[in-house]
Image: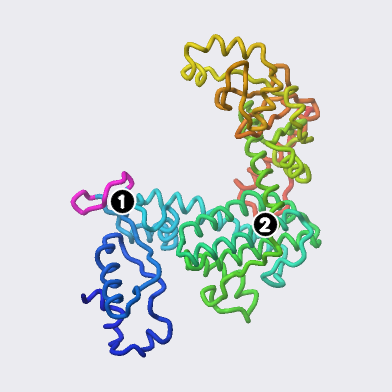
Amino acid sequence: FDSGAMPYAQFNVTSNDHPIFTEGQFPADYICEAVDQTRGWFYSLHALAVLLKGKPSYRNVICLGLILDDQGEKMSKTKGNIVEPWSVINTHGADALRWYLLTAAPPGNARRFSQDLVEESVRKFLLTLWNTYSFFVTYALLDGFEPTSAEPGELTSGLDRWVVSELNQLILNVTDDMENYNPTDAGRKIEAFAGELSTWYVRRSRRRFWKSENDSDKHSAYQTLYTCLVTLSKLMAPLTPFLAEEMYQNLVVTANTSAPDSVHLSNFPIADQARIDKELGDATQLVMKVVSIGRAARQKVRAKVRQPLASVLVMTKTPGESALLLPLSDQVRDELNVKEVRVIAEAEASEYLAVRLNGSVVGPKYTDRLPAINKAFAIANKGDIIKSILGNQSITIGEFTLDAEDLNVSASPDSPYAGIWEGGYYVAIDTRLTPGLKQEGLARELVHGIQNMRRSADFDIADRILVWHQGDATL
């Protein structure tokens, strides 16, 4: 009874006109406790509220699951598998502990816990974000960048438009998740955005920050990245309060003395839906997918990342996707270090692709009928088979109907291309190297070596250095 009476007893409520009823404090918005309170406090609060007021005591529940050790066992002093919280906080910080617990699993689920798991979450998100923040601070100080506001302004760069679109979509998604008491999905979406901000936007914009001219394009890159970092600090504030405050103080308070004194006193971001460009977002995700498969194709033939190649072939699932990809093909070209991107149509597929039965799948599935399938496959039109695979249609070979998993798609044996087929996409690189391509690759390796030597010598990023090298006529 005493736990159920908590809302009334703590304020000495004796009448229906008490402020907790008249000022909207009852029922409570939410309650948060461990799973063992399902038959305890969670129940007693409702039972007494219905008895006294004819309504529930609260509207939402965040129920916390058990924290297990790294082997999935319940922690106990007897087993000696307890992890002391302060040891984690002293090693990785309170925000790291908080972030792992919030994003590892939904609150009501049990989750494994160890120092290593917290460290992994630090590496995947907190360090990634901190490195992006450090990159901005380093070059902004070097160039004397002064933010005009926390808004990006007019955007002429497609890369800027994309990241601002994604940022505003993130604000919408995180706001929705937090309003629905779902910090796990909110945190995961923030982490995903921070990853793309680092590995795509910043990496693809590096030359804009590095160039000596202080032009409008460079300023736009700074202003856009500044907007992203300030907005992230506000979105993260309920989840990682200390890191968010550190970023906000340096990015906002030092630049604008009239700004709120703390990120926790700032307004939560509101999405500018006019900035959201779904088509651009879909196109960029497609580019990332193609680039990922293309990198795997390079690894497959051990083509060095810094070695330029003549061309890459790309086949998408649909003509619509091909149309989306074409305007951004320069990004594919740059990311895969090739001179030309060729988006091939379904009608051209049979020129570059070969298809064969996947014996490890077909054999166990059909057993006695395998000879008949082999015979039918030998005389089947391979172009029609490839078209069926691309169109995600059933594959008919004689009297047999096969699934996509029954077949292997690869580069044609006569083709100079080496490729990978993945999820309906095919990306293949030209493996032929001309003398010119080889020399360009050598030059890039030389530059890479010099950069490594700069780091080893602990040069400042603004230091101008003299380089001496010796080699044969090729070098």
Q: Residue 163 carries which label?
A: 2
Q: Is mark 1 on a helix, strand or loop?
A: strand
Region of the chain picked out in magenta, as a range:
70-80
Q: How crowded is mark 1: few (under 14 residues within 10 Å), some or many (20 or more)?
A: some
Q: Residue at x 48, y 20 (%)?
A: 365
Residue 43 visible? The answer is yes
Q: Where is residue 337 in the image (x, y as percent from the top left)?
A: 72, 37
Of the pair 412 and 145, the residue shown nearer to us: 412
On the image, which quarter does residue 294 sit in? top right
Task: Tell me which amino acid carries mark 1.
Answer: Leu
Left/right placement of residue 457 relative to residue 327 reads left
Cα separation, mark 2 vs mark 1, equals 38 Å
Q: How crowded is mark 2: few (under 14 residues within 10 Å), some or many (20 or more)?
A: many
- Which numbered disc, 2 or 1, marks the residue that appears first in the sequence? 1
Image quadrant holding the N terminus, namely bottom left
Left/right placement of residue 50 relative to residue 429 reads left
On the image, which quarter does residue 392 sit in? top right
Q: What element carries label 2?
A: helix
Is residue 278 positioned above or below 266 on the image?
above
Q: Residue 68 carries which label?
A: 1
Q: Which residue is drawn at 70% across and 17% down?
A: 381
Left/right placement of residue 344 relative to residue 136 reads right
